[in-house]
Amino acid sequence: MATPEQVTAHYESWPFPGLDHGSREGLILLRSLTEWLGQRETEAREARVIDVGCGTGHTVVALAKHFPEVEFVGLDAAEGVLDTARSHAESMGIENVKFALADIAHDLAEYDPFDIVLSLGVLHHVPQLAEAFGRVARLVKRGGHLVVWLYGRFGRACHLLNQQFVAMLASDDLDERLDVARAFLEELGPRFAVDSGFYTPCGSREEGIEWLLEQPQWLADQMVPALEYSLSLPEILDLFSHHSLEFVKWLGVPTDLARYTTSSV
């Protein structure tokens, strides 16, 4: 199992997620924050939002621009990645977001509770995930909201096999593993995209393959992560229950069972 330091080194080498893309999930998150923060300027002015594992600041800077009255904080364990985030905020003229070095694999006790806590695509890369989830959960103010994005075990199952296959063909050298992953995708192309379970802002079909091949930081994240977990639905709900959090809703996940079947019942 990779150590927290190895995970951090991975993202220092390949700063994630970059800055030049949008996504359907981002729009859904924006809609939810608009609902939670309220429509009145006085409510928003007193609100505080933290993005734990903010990476290059792609999400938190965009939110800070949309909600100028709200105080935003972005945390990450990779200093080089935070430099990119700070530069991004400065280039956008955003002044209501601050960035700080912090590792959720260790301690977040110095921070007071926040109205909204985000941890998007982060916890499933952290050793001792349950303990890290607890540290993040303790940042949520009473009556506040926690938004987490975690890989699902069954939706990710085929892709985990693909990751293992790439790992078998290469050494531990990251550049070599990326070369193998790139050749793997170029060779299989559309065949790889069928029900493979990888994720990109362009989806998980052929357009997603093209995205991975053009975006090395995404290729590294999806194909050769330093550490990756996936969780079952009961495991996710148990995390919330253990920390006295009420599960409210999925964001952007269809709840119509017919969407997940190929035959009539």
Image (tube, grey):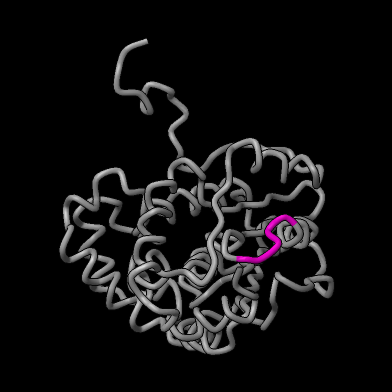
Instruction: Give the camera-side residue of 22 and 97.
Output: 22
The image shows residue 166, relative to residue 40, as above or below, that is: below
x and y percentages locating residue 67 in the rendered image: 55, 64
Tell me: 141 left or right of 133. right
Q: Quadrant of the C terminus?
A: top left
The image shows residue 42, relative to residue 64, as above or below, that is: above
x and y percentages locating residue 211 in the rendered image: 25, 65
Q: Residue furthest top?
A: 265
Q: Main secondary structure of the magenta part?
A: loop
Tell me: 232 left or right of 206. right
Q: Is residue 257 magenta?
A: no
The image shows residue 48, relative to residue 148, as above or below, that is: below
Report the residue at 78% width, 46% height from top: 143
The image shows residue 199, relative to residue 72, as above or below, that is: above
Q: Quadrant of the N terminus?
A: bottom right
Instruction: Give the camera-side residue of 250 and 241.
Output: 241
Residue range of the region highlighted in magenta in the rendering: 126-130
Report the residue at 33% width, 67% height from top: 21
